[in-house]
Amino acid sequence: PENEAWSIQDDKVENIADEVAMIRKLRFLFKFLGLFFSPIKDMMSGYIWEEDGKAVALVNVSPKGLNKSAWTIGNVVVLPEHRRKGIARKLVTATIDYARRKKADTVMLDVIAGNTPALKLYESLGFENYGGVVELEYDPTDKPTQEQPLPPEYSLIKYESKDWKLRYELTKRITPDIVQKYEAVTKSRFHRPLLMRAVRVIVLKLAPFSGHLYLIRHDGSDTIVGQIHYMTRKN
């Protein structure tokens, strides 16, 4: 990017490379699943812009999970020497049209705060800013703070697939209306078909990362009040 602050950090580049390698290993599995689930068949769709036989820009668009009506645009990339020619606009417009043909109701994307050229492009195409994510970095040279136990009336519960209703109800309760306008909190986001649950076990075995999800319960009211999910690279 034109500003280094908008770039992807080296560790994230490694994560993306590992995930792509995993998808390559499982491409035949994904192709098989695409026979039963159209969102998987359409995963990583998009367009490449070529000039003189060379790829100079690309954009990806995929269904968001197994949701056929919500799609996500990613990897809007144009080589520096080919920018300011309207290529990105044409590519993003093409992906929106593609998602429409696939009966999408919503198309969303992420943009790094401060990337004004990209933000203006997306707003000019009709996108609205409705939410945000804050990333915090931890310096490994710092000494870790002493672990603080939860208050006695709270419990940490390791999440199991059977607990999907608890996650659904928590997410439904805490997600702002403006976010739900674009990303509806539906049961299908949390309760996967049996075949997809079996595939998930295979994917996690081959994935370059591992992780766990925990729920926080207030024992007095037996209410789930929070969740925390962490992932670590296996290597």
Image (cartoon, rainbow, N blue to C red):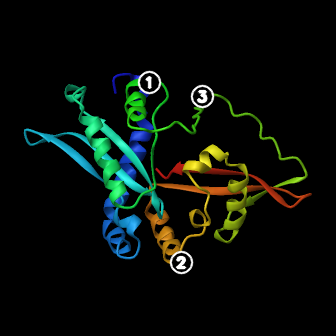
Marks 1 and 2 close (CB-CB < 8 Å):
no
Asked which secondary structure carries label 3, the reply is: loop
Which residue is located at x 20 percent, y 29 percent?
A: 82
Instruction: Looking at the picture, tell me which residue is in the foreground, 52 or 162.
Output: 52
Q: Is residue 44 visible?
A: no
> Which of pointers 3 and 1 lies earlier in the amino acid sequence?
1
Circle number at residue 141: 3
Which tag, 1 or 2, sits closer to the chain's start?
Answer: 1
Disc 2 residue type?
Leu
Of pointers 2 and 3, the one earlier in the residue sequence: 3
Measure how far apart labels 3 and 1 are at the Cα level.
22 Å
Query: Is the residue marked by circle 3 packed among few (<14), some (14-19), or many (20+) residues within 10 Å?
Result: few
Query: Residue, x 49% and y 77% (percent of image)?
Result: 195
In the rendered structure, the answer to whether residue 208 lies left or right of residue 157 reads left
Q: Residue shown at 49%/72% (left/top)? A: 196
Q: Amino acid at mark 3?
A: Thr
Q: In which quarter of the view is residue 216 placed?
A: bottom right
Q: Which residue is mark 1?
A: 5
SS type, badge 2: helix
